[in-house]
Image (cartoon, rainbow, N blue to C red):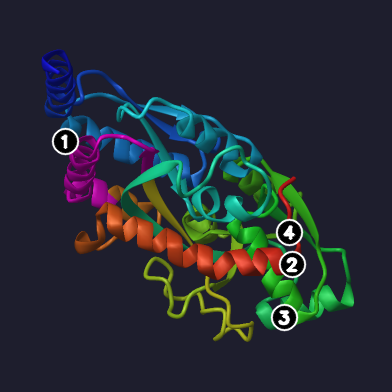
């Protein structure tokens, strides 16, 4: 009994010491999309500021493929010690869970740390697309059934599902062209290789401002602060469709609560940094309210989005490819 009590006390002491000293080495932040995309840009800005608030270097590891499932799965299988973090959004930690077999559970195999930032979904098109607004876009697609090409990051992503909802409610058809990440998609959109996309507004803000692309509508209940001249989907004459790319931070399940608390505090402090706020604003990312920068808020957001989107995915029969 004495040996058992000593062993328990020793283990507890090691765990406590680990939490008190964490982190003692660089931390890896896995971004499940290619470098150059909106999630990668957000992660790199955050990692730079976290270096100061966390006291260690934060290394970005881009593990792309399968609509973000490969990189997210890499974190699900990592040691629960706080040194491997998962940057994700509505696709990686909500939609993918309804699209097929992952080998991990998007809820139970992770611990939430905090929401980070949000950007709405835009309907954007190549600069010389013939329609001047959503009504003309719908009319053009009806007059040219199946001719329009729509770029999507993977099959079953937020933009893809929003596009499917749009198609059903407008009676239009188009070809979906899957991409591994937002960066190659936007390159093809600017060059005119594809016609349109339903994607992260932050990813298209600068090309729209420069006239390389057109923004037709924002899938939100009110106009987006970064582009107030772009109408909402309802104002533009489209269906009542709201969708956004909110980002959050997760760690593997069984990560010690004290470690999660340290990570949460470090991220929350980083999100208060004036330079970070300006850089997030410049790329169209809106930081979550201070009182919602906690694990409970991220868990609640994930739960609400699962309840909203999973029935739509299953009804439409959308599967990962």
**Residue nearest the observer in this picture, 22 or 225:** 22
Q: Quadrant of the N terminus?
A: top left
Q: Which of the 4 quarters of the picture holds residue 214?
A: bottom right
Query: Is residue 137 visible in this depiction of the protein?
Result: yes
Distance from Cα at disc 1 to Cα at disc 3: 47 Å
For disc 4, the marked residue is: 318
Q: Is residue 70 left or right of residue 253?
A: right
Instruction: Using the rendered view, name the quadrant where residue 87 is placed.
Output: top left
Label 3, label 4: how far apart the Cα atoms are:
16 Å
Name the residue tied to disc 3: 169
Task: Tell me which residue sits at (16%, 36%) in the image.
Answer: 53
| Label 3 secondary element | helix
* For marks 3 and 4 on the same chain, the one whose residue lies earlier in the sequence: 3
Give yes or no for contact between labels 4 and 2 (Cβ–Cβ under 8 Å).
yes
| Residue identifier under label 2 | 316
- 314 vs 209, nearest the viewer: 314
Badge 1: residue crowd in 10 Å (few <14, some 14–19, many ≥20): some
């Amino acid at each position: 009994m004495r040996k058992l009590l000593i062993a328990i006390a020793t283990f507890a002491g090691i765990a406590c010491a680990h939490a008190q000293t964490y982190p003692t080495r660089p931390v890896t932040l896995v971004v499940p999309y290619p470098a150059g995309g909106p999630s990668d840009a957000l992660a790199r800005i955050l990692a730079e500021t976290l270096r100061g608030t966390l006291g260690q270097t934060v290394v970005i590891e881009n593990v792309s493929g399968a609509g973000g499932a490969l990189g997210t799965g890499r974190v699900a299988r990592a040691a629960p010690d706080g040194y491997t973090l998962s940057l994700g959004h509505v696709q990686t930690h909500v939609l993918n869970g309804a699209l097929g077999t992952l080998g991990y559970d998007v809820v139970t195999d992770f611990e939430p740390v905090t929401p980070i930032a949000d950007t709405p979904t835009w309907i954007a098109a190549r600069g010389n697309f013939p329609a001047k607004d959503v009504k003309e876009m719908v009319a053009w697609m009806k007059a040219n059934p199946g001719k329009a090409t729509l770029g999507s990051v993977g099959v079953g992503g937020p933009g893809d599902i929003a596009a499917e909802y749009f198609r059903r409610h407008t009676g239009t058809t188009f070809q979906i062209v899957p991409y591994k990440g937002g960066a190659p998609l936007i390159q093809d959109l600017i060059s005119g290789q594809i016609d349109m996309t339903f994607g992260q507004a932050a990813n298209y803000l600068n090309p729209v401002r420069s006239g390389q692309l057109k923004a037709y509508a924002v899938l939100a209940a009110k106009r987006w602060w970064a582009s107030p001249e772009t109408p909402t989907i309802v104002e533009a004459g489209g269906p009542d469709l709201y969708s956004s790319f909110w980002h959050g931070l997760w760690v593997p399940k069984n990560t010690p609560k004290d470690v999660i608390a340290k990570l949460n505090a470090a991220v929350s402090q980083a999100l208060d940094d004036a330079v970070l706020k300006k850089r997030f604003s410049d790329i169209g990312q809106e930081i979550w309210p201070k009182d919602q920068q906690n694990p409970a808020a991220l868990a609640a957001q994930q739960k609400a989005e699962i309840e909203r989107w999973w029935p739509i995915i299953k009804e439409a029969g959308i599967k990962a490819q």
